[in-house]
Structure formats: structure tokens, C-alpha cells
């Protein structure tokens, strides 16, 4: 999956910030601990004319996730 | 403004300015309150959606389920503003992260970073871990087994979630424990899934109104972290899901009759909206 690549400063700037009354940015780290942001097409339309529009100009890259935890394996 | 052209124009003007009250006589008062919350938030609902919600509320009251509900997210209105609103009350208004797609068919997370925070903590809101229920209506057909959490939270060894088709094709529905002895082999990922505790030290689960799990296990503690939709809320958010959510609820524990009636009402709701699975 392709996402916007963030520096640590950019991550700290946007993480948890509301860009709409009921929507906030949530970033995730990839397997190499690089911060990514994923926006839906609707998100992109929403922020295109806001203070967050600079996000749309960030570099994009392929996101490789960290392994998902599986508590079922740990308890069985 | 003086209305001289009759009843239909009066209704039109009132409807474009929100619902004044239930005095119109068409809708249940709690349904109207929800419509007004959606409007105030900047969302809109179609007439079909309003009628479907109204019928759902009336049926839940008739069935004696309404008073047990704490949060109901009917996922109508095709916007974050509308879908964040709790049908039951003005409490537990949701907040969505980036990465969702909103449509008349429901709300779809990206499976990578998107979730919705209900603001509901079992530890804070429920007097007993043995009196709690939550459920998720998935509109995603054909999903394979994966470590994806449709709704839930994990605090230490207290896990409360719905895992529709986990690794090994198991459906798990833990409430305030982490025993994982409550598995049902699930061959698909669509339908209405409910996890429930209404009896001391027993966990039950239903798929589409049919009880698929009924086991003895003891809660470890009430889960503290907020229940979120489309991921698991723990020290870090994990196990992001990509299933389309068409309805979600949080309530006190339900009886078998409650749950059967709830499924019937929710399925009728989805059918009215032409999105039943």
C-alpha cells in the first residue's frame, strides 16, 4: 500500500490533529519504523484547501507493515 | 413566513430546517433527536435512512432492547459527521481517524491505519464485566482469514473484541478475558457478529442471530482502554481491519431473546437500505 512518508517532525506535527470536526490524522510506523500517513480520496479532497494541504505534496512510498500481534497464539 | 400553500409545503420547509420536535407525529422522539444531532454536526440523512432509523428505534423499544443500549452507530449519512453520531444518546459520539471511506453502504476502513474511537470504556461504564455486549455488522463478503480486529480493546490480560475470521478461520469474541477458548470456525466475513456476557462467568456469541459460542470463562478484569472500531486498542493500536461496517453497538448484556430480536431488527434495517448481506 502506498502512503505519504513523514519525518519525525512532520509526524509530531500532525498526529492526533483534527482536520475536520470528527476526523483526525493517525500515522503508523512501517517495519523500519518510518512514519506513514494514509489518506482516502475523501480525506484528500477535504484537506486540499486547508492548512494541511502540504501533506498532499509529501513523498510517497510503499508501506511494509510490522507483524500484527496475535494474542491467540500466545494463549493457546 | 406565512404558509398559504398547504400541508406539503409546510413539511418541506420544516424538513429543510431540521426537525423541530416529534410533534409532526411521524417519527419517534429519540429518532428525531438523532436526526437533529446529525444535522447539527453538519451531516444529512435521506428520507429512506430516516425512515429506516425510525423503524429500528421503534422495534428496539418494542422488543425491550433500547434501554439496554449504550451506543448505536447505524452508519448512515455517508459522512464522518453523520456516522460519528450515537443513535442512543448524545454520549459516546465517535471520532474517525484518516483513512475511512464513507458511503450509503456503510463505512470502510483502509485496513492499515483507520479506526473509530467510540470513547466507551467497559471499566468506566459497566458495573460488571458479566454485563456487557457489543456487535458489528460486516458488509464485506469473501474476506480471508487474517489477524484483523473489527472492534475491541486490550488492557493487560483483559481483552474485549470481535475477531470475525482470525488466523485459522476462527471467529473469536472475547469479553474482559483472554482465554481464547471461545472459537467458532467461520467460512466468511460478512454478517452480524455479537459478543455477550449476561450470565456470570460465561461468554456467548452469535452470528446472524444464531448462537455459535456459549462457553464458561471467567473475566480477568474490566477492559480499561476504549472500545474502537476497525482495530484493537491497546498500548498501541494494532490489528487494523478493512471490513465495511454497516452497524455497530455497545450495550448491557443481552438475553438470547434480546439478541434474536436485535438481529431481526438490524437485518430489517439493512434491508430497507438495500445493503443487507
Image: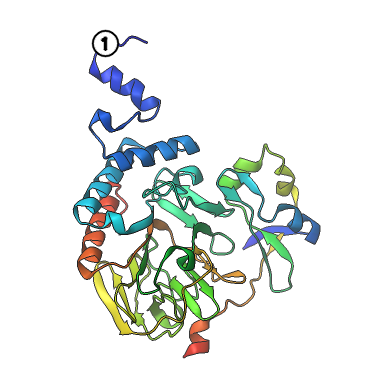
Q: Residue at x 64, y 53 (%)?
A: A25
Q: Is B221 on the left-hand or right-hand side of B45?
A: right
> Image quarter for residue B207?
bottom left
Give the farthest residue toward the bottom: A76
x and y percentages locating residue B3 in the rendered image? 30, 11
Quadrant for residue B252, please give it. bottom left
Q: Chain of mark 1?
A: B
Which quadrant holds the N terminus of chain B? Answer: top left
Q: Position of residue B176 (x, y in %)?
A: 44, 76
Q: Is residue B49 above or below residue B1?
A: below
In the rendered image, residue B9, in percent from the top left (x then y), is placed at 29, 17
Q: Which residue corresponds to mark 1?
A: B5
Examine the image and state in which quarter residue B238 appears.
bottom right
Colouring scheme applied when the structure was drawn = rainbow
Disc 1 secondary structure class: loop
Q: Position of residue B82 (x, y in %)?
A: 45, 43
Write the residue at 57% across / 43% down. Answer: A21
Amino acid at each position: 500500500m502506498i502512503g505519504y512518508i513523514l519525518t519525525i517532525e512532520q509526524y509530531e506535527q500532525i498526529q492526533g490533529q483534527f482536520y475536520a470536526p470528527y476526523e483526525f490524522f493517525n500515522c503508523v510506523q512501517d517495519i523500519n519504523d518510518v512514519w506513514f500517513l494514509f489518506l482516502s480520496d475523501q480525506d484528500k479532497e477535504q484537506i486540499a484547501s486547508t492548512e494541511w494541504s502540504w501533506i498532499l505534496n509529501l513523498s510517497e512510498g510503499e508501506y511494509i507493515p510490522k507483524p500484527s500481534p496475535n494474542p491467540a497464539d500466545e494463549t493457546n | 413566513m406565512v404558509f398559504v400553500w398547504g400541508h406539503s409545503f409546510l413539511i418541506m420547509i420544516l424538513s429543510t430546517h431540521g426537525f423541530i420536535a416529534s410533534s409532526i407525529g411521524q417519527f419517534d422522539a429519540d429518532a428525531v433527536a438523532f436526526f437533529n444531532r446529525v444535522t447539527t454536526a453538519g451531516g444529512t440523512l435521506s428520507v429512506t435512512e430516516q425512515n429506516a432509523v425510525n423503524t429500528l428505534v421503534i422495534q428496539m423499544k418494542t422488543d425491550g432492547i433500547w434501554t439496554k443500549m449504550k451506543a448505536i452507530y447505524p452508519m448512515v449519512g455517508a459522512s464522518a459527521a453523520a456516522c460519528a453520531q450515537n443513535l442512543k444518546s448524545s454520549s459516546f459520539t465517535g471520532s474517525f481517524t484518516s483513512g475511512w471511506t464513507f458511503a450509503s453502504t456503510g463505512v470502510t476502513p483502509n485496513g492499515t491505519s483507520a479506526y473509530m474511537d467510540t470513547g466507551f470504556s467497559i471499566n468506566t461504564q459497566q458495573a460488571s464485566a458479566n454485563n456487557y455486549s457489543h456487535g458489528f455488522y460486516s458488509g464485506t463478503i469473501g474476506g480471508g482469514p487474517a489477524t484483523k480486529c473489527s472492534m475491541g480493546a486490550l488492557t493487560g490480560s483483559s481483552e474485549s473484541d470481535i475477531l470475525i475470521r482470525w488466523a485459522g478461520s476462527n471467529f473469536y469474541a472475547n469479553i474482559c478475558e483472554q482465554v481464547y477458548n471461545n472459537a467458532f470456525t467461520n467460512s466468511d466475513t460478512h454478517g452480524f457478529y455479537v459478543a455477550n456476557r449476561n450470565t456470570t462467568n460465561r461468554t456467548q456469541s452469535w452470528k446472524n442471530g444464531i448462537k455459535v459460542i456459549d462457553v464458561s470463562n471467567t473475566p480477568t478484569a474490566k477492559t480499561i482502554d476504549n472500545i474502537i472500531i476497525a482495530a484493537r486498542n491497546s498500548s498501541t493500536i494494532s490489528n487494523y481491519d478493512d471490513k465495511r461496517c454497516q452497524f455497530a453497538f455497545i450495550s448491557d448484556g443481552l438475553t438470547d431473546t434480546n439478541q434474536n430480536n436485535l438481529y431481526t431488527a438490524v437485518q430489517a434495517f439493512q434491508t430497507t437500505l438495500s445493503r443487507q448481506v
